[in-house]
């Protein structure tokens, strides 16, 4: 706690160079800026593993922050540092994914639900039977595992759905596109595609190869969402997975620091599915679109009820004491 | 007094071995076709769609797809081949390509496509020149030098991307045409790649610069003795490598049409592998771009195969590593060199 | 005395830099103290082991691009086994697995005559895949004593620091002074002369890689100890270990350097990250700073050594 | 001798690719015996020594040690069998200090120290890095290390080539003493004086074959040379009067007070167009430094160089080449791109300058390279890779490179090292012809008879200074031999 009435918040993130994570960081900066009582934001943002995140959290503790908002690389791996932080009275908020440390607040996108929603829509769209391509993220990473659980849950509900190809895109655009081309080249037909967020390049692959489009499920990345309205004959759905959850995490941390802790330690931000097969869904998508946004950024730049910054502020991507 | 040349008759097998050693492309190409055959056996109809009724005896779709994604890999492999000729390596190419793609995509809407591409290429040039200065004057090992500049370029890219979040992305039309367009069933990228490959092959075989690259790698002292100032060569070489990497990034941008902040990074290790599979020696003095092209094709076929193979991801990765090792070991055995 | 100083000038210089950086940290953050140093030591743990392994193979004249993958294999092996059996046997098995992987790398290099960099590039994939086959998603568990063994203080020093120093010293010091250690330096320095001096260079190479594997196993175990679980995805240890080894005075090409310098370099690199975090430097600038330091120090080293040689 | 010899090797053969280094080599040495192993350059002496000591695997042959058939698979095994070599090149590890080098080879330190002292080095510190020690010291350390291992058979390969005379005497003394105590010694050397003072017997190799065993007795040199060279080859005589006349006007190359510390001090001479100026010296008298400075590899520490009367200063060999000074180093491995073709090797200087990085002028290149190949009669059957050529032809390629570019001043450093007599016979007239066509040639040779065959006069270097200038007409071998040992000036004074 800070006697001078200004809080310093530390941020820890372990994936760099991915549109989603960049948006998350910008949302954190913007939210910290609009929260009047945050005077400092220390961002530790790099590509590393859980051990590296432990190091970053410990450094943030050393820096004397009042709260730590982190996107955990793994729910179980960070407990030692998080417990130390909480022992010192530092508020810990995990965003995007959960942590198992007692006393930590979790403001998490429900990854399992994310996969389940999209998969169920897809299977429904196929009339409960058919062959699908299942394009996952990075093998061995927590978020991918959570999503796989959701996907398998949906799959169990639709026994006539058959996964013909399962592959890891590594959350890399180029990998995903090449893999889809490879699938198209085999000539083995499939009826739908579920992707773990590498989505518009998949649509591109269909368009470029002239293959007939099949229903495609992706995330609410700006590029994919605009395709949902612009590409003729594309049936698809975007499942929201807001990077702005980072901003919400900052807001939650400040609330807690100000003594307004929520009743429950865990707040799940449940995803929403936007599909383009109904009038209503189309309208939602039209409203959400933002052509000027980096195509890798999720279009859901705000989380109503949580974040207070403006579009300009998140795009400016400047925290307190910068710019 | 040992000019007595061996005149014993040579057994046929040894002769065949020597012939192979003199024509190392032959086993490589044979291996490529074996892989393709294996792919066809695994997934009948993918290569030869006679039975599935798709176009042609050999699927043009499959071939053009194979060629298209092998092109950026082969271009980055050219950077590795050229630098390895002098016993160097360029580990900054993946990031340089990514930077070029990102810069071009974000600048096109403000300054127009051609200036944007020029800025992107000059980014590659700058990184290349820095690499060259470090290698030539400070004599930093190229591995460390290019690793360091790669890190610096990554940081600069991240700083830059924060400035252009709202600029929107526009991909120059001609890059899209190159990246996704087709002519006679073949990717338009070949319009860039064929002249590029011809240029590199010409550069390596028929120009003084190419001669000197080989010379520096096989014996730097001999080159010095003949009047070669190696700093000039290193500077030009790494600058060229940077420019090639930037060009690759632009082409890749047209292909993937999504300028992510790690767009071409995954091509780095495969570009080294393609060069090595193609018979380029990491110790300098020996290398072939034609081999690297075949190496890139092999890697692409291998990727397709592993993508289509139903097996745990771990097993795919293991297999990928083992096959790279097997090909290079075989190659070393056949050519009797390293 | 002065000869000793000259011989170890690089390492001494690094130590001075480390002390200065500690002072700087204290100046930036007056509350930085024992706790900070303890967490620094823990952060350095996996890097230190990876760097020790890398340094040895560079000294023998090679390079091992598969260190991070081997660490992942050992981490998941340990995490999986510790769920099912006692900590000690699991730990020993993990160490054995590390040695075996290193020895396989070395044997492949010696037998196939394919250059080190190529073999270990291929093995990077092989070991990475192996880790995923052992454990598909992060999980498993680590024995409590292993986790506690690197937390807190003993004899007034951070346990993690003691573990790093004691384990590396325990393995390396006896070897360094032994025939094997000399053979490693000799092979890296001049393989032909070493062979003519009676060194079995092939076997030396394999043993050096096996040692690297052993240190990678320790690195993997420390990852498991730090996180309490096993993660099958390799962390950012490859480039960091090459950089730290080179900063620490180990010359690419072989024959020169020791392990002390690289370990000090690891601590320097870690404390620089701490300082940048404490100063709330933009994380992207942090990347630039790290790259610049890497290139800058090596250039500086090159200039100093060529100057030294000229005056000598 | 009725006792079993310590070492008895027969029928040893070894090929490197197409090069047959040894075909049928044979050698015996008994206890207390010092056997000279003689042969022309490239006869296979070093190869033989390496095979006997396990550093190379023979293709065929039998080695008996004390009558036992022993497979010597590695240098370590050889040492255990009592065979300890000192190779032609230093074999100490550059990055280890002396003490560690000793431990590496299990050499006892006490005896080693004694030997070092006995061999004339008093102030050796065991913590010195090998890389910091001068070559002569390294040779002594190599020998002391070998002796400290108490060998049964000591194999010395051109041990004395890089030593100053005072150390040579100590070495000879020690070796003789050890032989007296029962050790067998195989002594490789090109120096007849050493051999006749030291050895009991000489085994002569020619073309990789043992062609004779000679007892050392007065007049044995003639016989040995005959055996080494095969048929007596008439190397011809030459008229040197014409060249002397050309020595006037501005010299092509003028060297004044040139020094390269610490080896070379105050060297001055003029080299005129049309002249072949020989340099003779024992190993390590400053000739390497002289050529390095003239070729632009090193900067002189004092003195001036002028070309056609204009002072020049070289920061890089490219500068020297621009001034018309072209260098053929003694070690052809330094000069050749062994994996590249003959053509590329010869044409390399064409592309050296940035201005020539563009397309290769293939016609021009083919003409020039063809000219050089024809002129030197390079055997181009294996031209794809220079390393497949025989050594003599490789050597010709290094010279051909400058023939193709056009020669003004040629710096030849021991150009006939490791090449056979036939090729030598082609090279002398070529050098003469170059000079007659207006080139200036500086010609260092380690083989003294070449002075009379190729040069107009010879400078004698001793201890980094020119101690004598001898005209070709007077340059018979005994005169030169005395001169290179620094004896002339003393005699002249007397
Ligand atoms: N720049 C070069 N790099 C490598 N090899 C070369 C080069 N130039 C020529 N060669 C090789 O040297 C050999 C002889 O070439 P040469 O130029 O004498 O023949 P050519 O008849 O002029 O060639 P071409 O018919 O290709 O024009 C050929 O094997 C050729 O491949
Ligand atoms: N590693 C090698 N590869 C190819 N050829 C070799 C190799 N080593 C030696 N040779 C060749 O074998 C022949 C014999 O060489 P060796 O060194 O034994 O000669 P030498 O009698 O010791 O000559 P010198 O008096 O010059 O030392 C030479 O023609 C040499 O070029
Ligand atoms: Mg020889
Ligand atoms: Mg010899």
Image (cartoon, coloured by chain):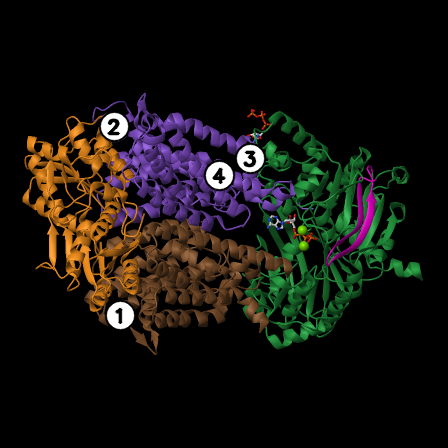
Chain colours: A orange, B purple, C brown, D green
Q: Which residue is mark 2?
A: A208
Output the chain of dot 1: C
Q: Is residue D268 magenta?
A: yes
Q: Which residue is mark 1?
A: C146
Q: Residues within 10 Å of mark 4 (few under 14, many from 20)?
A: many
In the displayed structure image, the side of residue B338 where residue B311 appears, left or right: left
The single residue placed furthest to the right in the displayed view is D494
Q: Which residue is mark 4?
A: B239
Q: Are marks 1 and 2 in contact (CB under 8 Å)?
A: no
Output the chain of dot 2: A
Q: Nearer the viewer, residue D177 or B142?
A: B142
Image quarter in which the N terminus of chain D is found: bottom right
- Asked if badge 3 and badge 1 are on a common chain, one would say no
Above-or-below relation of D410 to D368: below
- Asked if badge 4 and badge 1 are on a common chain, one would say no
Q: Which residue is mark 3?
A: B209
Q: Indicate the secondary structure of the residue bearing disc 2.
A: helix
First-in-chain label (4 vs 3) = 3
Look at the numbered disc 2 and say if its residue's Cβ is closer than 8 Å to ligand 1.
no
The answer for how far apart the CA atoms under marks 2 and 4 are is 34 Å
Q: Residues within 10 Å of mark 1 (few under 14, many from 20)?
A: some
Q: Position of residue A201 (x, y in %)?
A: 24, 35
Residues rendered magenta in the picture: D251-274
Output the chain of dot 3: B
Q: Residues within 10 Å of mark 3 (few under 14, many from 20)?
A: many
Residue mark closest to the camera, 2 vs 4: 4
- Kindly indicate the quadrant of the structure image that contains residue D150: bottom right
């Amino acid at each position: 706690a800070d006697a001078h009435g200004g809080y310093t918040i530390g941020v820890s993130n372990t994936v760099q160079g991915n549109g989603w994570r960049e948006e998350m960081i910008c949302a954190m900066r913007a939210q910290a800026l609009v929260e009047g009582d945050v005077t400092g934001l220390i961002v530790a943002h790099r590509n590393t593993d859980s051990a590296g995140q432990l190091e970053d959290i410990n450094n943030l503790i050393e820096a004397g922050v009042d709260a730590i908002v982190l996107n955990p690389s793994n729910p179980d791996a960070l407990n030692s540092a998080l417990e130390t932080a909480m022992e010192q009275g530092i508020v810990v908020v995990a965003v995007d994914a959960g942590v198992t440390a007692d006393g930590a607040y979790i403001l998490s996108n429900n990854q399992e639900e994310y996969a389940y929603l999209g998969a169920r829509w897809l299977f429904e769209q196929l009339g409960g039977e058919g062959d699908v391509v299942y394009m996952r993220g990075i093998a061995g990473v927590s978020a991918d595992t959570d999503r796989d659980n959701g996907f398998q849950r949906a799959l169990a509900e639709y026994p006539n759905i058959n996964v013909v190809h399962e592959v890891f895109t590594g959350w890399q655009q180029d990998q995903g596109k090449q893999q889809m081309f490879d699938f198209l080249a085999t000539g083995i037909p499939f009826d739908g595609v579920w992707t773990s967020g590498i989505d518009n390049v998949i649509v591109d692959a269909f368009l470029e190869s002239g293959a007939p489009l099949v229903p495609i499920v992706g995330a609410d990345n700006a590029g994919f969402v605009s395709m949902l309205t612009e590409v003729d004959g594309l049936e698809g759905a975007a499942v929201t997975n807001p990077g702005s959850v980072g901003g919400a995490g900052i807001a939650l941390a400040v609330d807690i620091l100000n003594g307004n802790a929520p009743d429950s330690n865990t707040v799940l931000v449940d995803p929403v599915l936007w599909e383009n097969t109904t009038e209503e869904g189309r309208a939602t998508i039209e409203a959400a679109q933002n052509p000027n946004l980096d195509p890798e950024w999720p279009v859901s730049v705000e989380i109503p009820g949580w974040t207070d910054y403006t579009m300009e502020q998140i795009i400016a991507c400047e925290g307190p004491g910068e710019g | 007094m040992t000019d007595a040349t061996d005149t014993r008759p040579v057994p046929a097998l040894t002769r065949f071995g020597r012939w192979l050693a003199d024509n190392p492309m032959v086993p490589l190409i044979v291996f490529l076709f074996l892989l393709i055959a294996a792919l066809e056996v695994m997934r009948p109809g993918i290569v030869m769609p006679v039975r599935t009724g798709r176009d042609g005896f050999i699927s043009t779709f499959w071939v053009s797809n194979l060629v298209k994604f092998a092109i950026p890999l082969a271009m980055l492999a050219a950077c590795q081949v050229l630098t390895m000729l002098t016993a160097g390596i360029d580990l900054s190419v993946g990031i340089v390509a990514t930077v070029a793609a990102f810069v071009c995509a974000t600048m096109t809407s403000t300054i127009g496509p051609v200036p944007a591409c020029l800025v992107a290429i000059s980014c590659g040039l700058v990184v290349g020149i820095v690499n060259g200065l470090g290698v030539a004057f400070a004599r930093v090992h190229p591995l460390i030098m290019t690793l360091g500049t790669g890190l610096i370029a990554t940081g600069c890219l991240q700083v830059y991307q924060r400035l252009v979040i709202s600029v929107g992305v526009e991909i120059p039309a001609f890059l899209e045409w190159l990246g996704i367009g087709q002519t006679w069933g073949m990717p338009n990228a070949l319009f860039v790649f064929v002249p590029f490959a011809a240029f590199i092959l010409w550069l390596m075989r028929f120009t003084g610069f190419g001669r000197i690259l080989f010379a520096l790698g096989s014996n730097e002292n001999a080159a010095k003795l003949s009047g070669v100032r190696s700093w000039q060569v290193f500077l030009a070489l790494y600058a060229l490598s940077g420019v090639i990497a930037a060009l690759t990034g632009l082409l890749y941008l047209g292909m993937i049409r999504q300028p992510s902040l790690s767009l071409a990074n995954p091509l780095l290790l495969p570009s080294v592998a393609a060069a090595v599979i193609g018979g380029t020696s990491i110790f300098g003095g020996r290398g072939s771009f034609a081999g690297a092209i075949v190496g890139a094709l092999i890697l692409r076929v291998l990727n397709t195969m592993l993508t289509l193979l139903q097996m745990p991801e771990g097993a795919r990765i293991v297999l990928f590593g083992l096959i790279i090792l097997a090909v290079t070991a075989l190659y070393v055995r056949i050519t009797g060199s390293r | 005395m002065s000869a000793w100083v000259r011989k170890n000038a690089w390492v001494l210089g690094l130590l001075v830099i480390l002390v200065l950086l500690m002072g700087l940290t204290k100046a930036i953050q007056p509350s930085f103290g024992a706790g900070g140093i303890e967490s620094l030591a823990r952060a350095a743990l996996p890097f230190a082991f990876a760097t020790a392994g890398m340094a040895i193979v560079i000294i023998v004249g090679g390079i091992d691009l598969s260190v991070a993958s081997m660490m992942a294999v050992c981490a998941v092996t340990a995490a999986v086994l510790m769920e099912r059996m006692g900590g000690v046997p699991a730990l020993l098995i993990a160490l054995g697995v590390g040695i075996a992987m290193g020895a396989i790398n070395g044997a492949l290099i010696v037998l196939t005559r394919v250059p080190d960099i190529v073999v270990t590039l291929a093995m990077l994939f092989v070991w990475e895949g192996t880790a995923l086959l052992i454990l598909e998603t992060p999980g498993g568990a680590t024995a409590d004593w292993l986790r506690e063994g690197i937390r807190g203080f003993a004899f007034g020093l951070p346990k993690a620091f003691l573990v790093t120093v004691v384990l590396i010293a325990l393995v390396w010091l006896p070897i360094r002074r032994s025939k094997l250690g000399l053979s490693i330096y000799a092979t890296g320095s001049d393989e032909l002369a070493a062979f003519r001096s009676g060194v079995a260079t092939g076997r030396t190479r394999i043993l050096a890689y096996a040692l690297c594997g052993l240190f990678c196993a320790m690195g993997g175990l420390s990852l498991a100890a730090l996180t309490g679980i096993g993660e099958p995805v390799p962390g950012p240890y490859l480039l960091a270990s090459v950089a730290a080894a080179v900063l620490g005075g180990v010359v690419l090409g072989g024959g020169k350097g020791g392990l002390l310098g690289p370990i000090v370099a690891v601590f320097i690199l870690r404390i620089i990250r701490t300082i940048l975090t404490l100063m709330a430097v933009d994380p992207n600038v942090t990347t630039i700073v790290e790259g610049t330091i890497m290139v800058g120090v090596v250039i500086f080293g090159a200039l100093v050594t060529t100057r030294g040689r000229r005056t000598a | 001798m009725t006792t079993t010899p310590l070492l008895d090797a027969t029928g040893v053969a070894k090929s490197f690719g197409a090069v047959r280094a040894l075909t049928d080599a044979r050698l015996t040495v008994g206890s207390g015996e010092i056997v000279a192993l003689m042969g022309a350059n490239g006869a296979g002496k070093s190869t033989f020594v390496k095979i006997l000591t396990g550093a190379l695997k023979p293709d065929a042959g039998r080695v008996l040690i004390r009558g036992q058939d022993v497979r010597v698979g590695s240098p370590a095994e050889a040492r255990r069998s009592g065979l300890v070599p000192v190779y032609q090149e230093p074999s100490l590890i550059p990055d280890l200090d002396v003490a560690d080098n000793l431990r590496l080879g299990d050499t006892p330190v006490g005896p080693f120290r004694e030997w070092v002292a006995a061999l004339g080095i008093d102030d050796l510190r065991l913590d010195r890095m090998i890389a910091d020690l001068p070559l002569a010291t390294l040779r002594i350390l190599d020998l002391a290390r070998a002796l400290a291992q108490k060998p049964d058979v000591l194999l010395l390969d051109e041990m004395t080539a890089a030593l100053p005379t005072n150390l040579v005497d100590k070495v000879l003394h020690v070796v003789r003493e050890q032989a007296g105590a029962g050790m067998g010694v195989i002594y490789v050397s090109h120096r007849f004086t050493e051999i006749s003072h030291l050895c009991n017997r000489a085994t002569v190799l020619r073309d990789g074959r043992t062609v004779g065993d000679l007892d050392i007795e007065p007049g044995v040199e003639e016989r040995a040379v005959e055996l080494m060279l095969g048929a007596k080859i008439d190397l011809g005589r030459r008229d040197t009067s014409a060249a002397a006349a050309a020595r006037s006007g501005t010299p092509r190359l003028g060297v004044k007070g040139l020094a390269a510390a610490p080896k070379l001090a105050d060297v001055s001479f003029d080299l005129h167009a049309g002249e072949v100026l020989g340099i003779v010296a024992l190993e390590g008298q400053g000739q390497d430094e002289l050529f390095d400075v003239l070729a632009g590899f090193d900067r002189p520490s004092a003195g001036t160089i002028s070309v056609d009367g204009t002072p020049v200063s070289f920061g890089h060999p490219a500068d020297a080449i621009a001034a018309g000074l072209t260098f053929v180093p003694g070690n052809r491995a330094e000069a050749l791109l062994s994996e590249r073709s003959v053509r590329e090797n010869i044409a390399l200087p064409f592309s050296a300058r940035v201005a020539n990085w563009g397309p290769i002028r293939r016609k021009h290149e083919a003409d020039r390279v063809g000219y050089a190949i024809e002129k030197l009669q390079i055997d181009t059957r294996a031209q794809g890779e220079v390393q497949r050529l025989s050594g003599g032809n490789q050597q010709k390629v290094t010279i051909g490179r400058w023939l193709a570019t056009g020669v003004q001043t040629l710096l030849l450093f021991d150009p006939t090292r490791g090449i056979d007599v036939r090729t030598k016979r082609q090279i002398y007239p070529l050098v003469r012809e170059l000079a007659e066509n207006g080139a200036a040639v500086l010609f260092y040779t380690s083989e003294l008879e070449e002075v009379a065959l190729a040069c107009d006069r010879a400078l004698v270097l001793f201890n980094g200074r020119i101690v004598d200038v001898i005209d070709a007409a007077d340059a018979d071998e005994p005169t030169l031999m005395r001169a290179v040992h620094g004896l002339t000036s003393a005699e002249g004074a007397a």
